Image: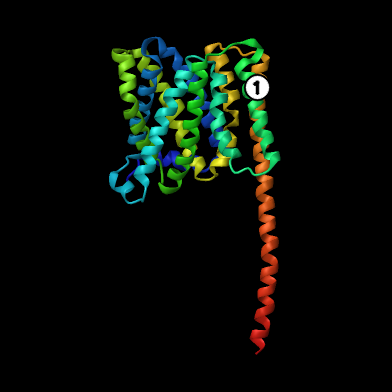
Amino acid sequence: MQQSSTAQGLSALAGNVPAPCLVLAGVCGIQFGAALAPSAYPQAGAAGVVFLRLLIAGVVLCLLWRPRRQTLSEVKGAWGTVLAAGTLLAGHHITFFEAVNHVPLGIVATIEFLGPFTIALAGSRRAIDLLPACLAAGGVLLLSDGGGVSLSPAGLVLAAAAASCWAGYILVSARMATRLSGGQGLALAITWAALLSAPYGIAHAGSALLDAHVLCVAAIVAIASSVLPYSLNLEALRRIPPRVFGVLTSLEPAAGAVFGLAILGQHLNWPQWLGITAVACASIAATYLGSRRRRASRTRATNDAAPEESADRNTQIPQATQ
């Protein structure tokens, strides 16, 4: 595979940036695009904008990375991983943007974040590890009925579906990042997501997909909220585990609330802001408890290995003198 000079330059630049900074930049790009996209909803609806966004992003990434079928065929399981990632991306985009059409962006982003949060909490075996889960659940309750403001049940269900798809994508994307170099896998995954969303987008938008305003908004959203963030996330996942990645995205709810307020004028009341804070704090707590558990496991493993090594040395000494 021969990638373009632009792709090589972007890869070199991203390689010199700390992984947490890449994730945070991706968070801002995704939420900015999510706040900008509804400006085209009156003409094309969420379905049309999602299709155009994925289509434009897929074309741009394919031009940058120039993926070849032979390259992916040489890696075992590469095609299955790429298709799974694209399917999850299509599901995530459709449910997320439809949810934003019913529920404020900050709340959608918070519920969506429960997907990565579940990954961060996975594997917990102690009672204390349930505290972050309880804190996150309390935050969601504050969001869903904060200050007596009712939210659309359909919007909440769509946001929960987006959370599930996003969690699955993180796991599959981590596998794709380790198996495939560069962004050829990502380019094909987004292109596949565009093909999957095409019937839904065309059926709902029709000729509005050719509207100049819709195309302009979709192009900006595609670059700011797909090409750059997903490329940065893929590079970050090559250097950090999915658990840490999921925790770093804890700023998504706050970023969504800020962009929703600045661009869409979506005001949240203080219980809902408190709910966003609670979910972010739950993420930090889960990270802290998880890091302590890993350190304790390494310490126990070291202590268990020490007596065995000592016993081996004691049995080897007499054999050497015989």
Query: Residue 287, position in %: x, y?
Result: 65, 39
In the image, 322: left or right of 242? right
Quarter holding residue 59: top left
- Which residue shows up at 39% across the image and 38% down it? 84
Q: Nearer the viewer, residue 56 or 174?
A: 174
Give the side of residue 243 with respect to residue 68, left or right.
right
Horizontal side of residue 57 vs 253, given as left or right: left
Identify the residue at image location x=42%, y=48%.
179
Left or right relative to 42: residue 151: right
Q: Residue 148's image quarter?
A: top right
For the point 60% across and 18% down, the residue is 144
Q: Residues within 10 Å of mark 1 (few under 14, many from 20)?
A: many
Residue at position x 65%, y 49% in the image: 294
The residue where tag 1 is placed is: 275
- Provide residue 174's location: percent of width, then percent of height: 48, 43
Q: Secondary structure at mark 1?
A: helix
Residue 218 rendering spot, x and y as whole percentages: 39, 20
Residue 39 at least partly seen: yes
The image position of residue 322, as x and y in percent, is 65, 90
Q: How is the image coloured?
A: rainbow
Q: Does residue 6 appear in the picture of this structure?
A: no
Residue 67, above or below 100: below
Q: Is residue 105 above or below residue 176?
A: above
Tally the numbered discs.
1
The amino acid marked with disc number 1 is Gly
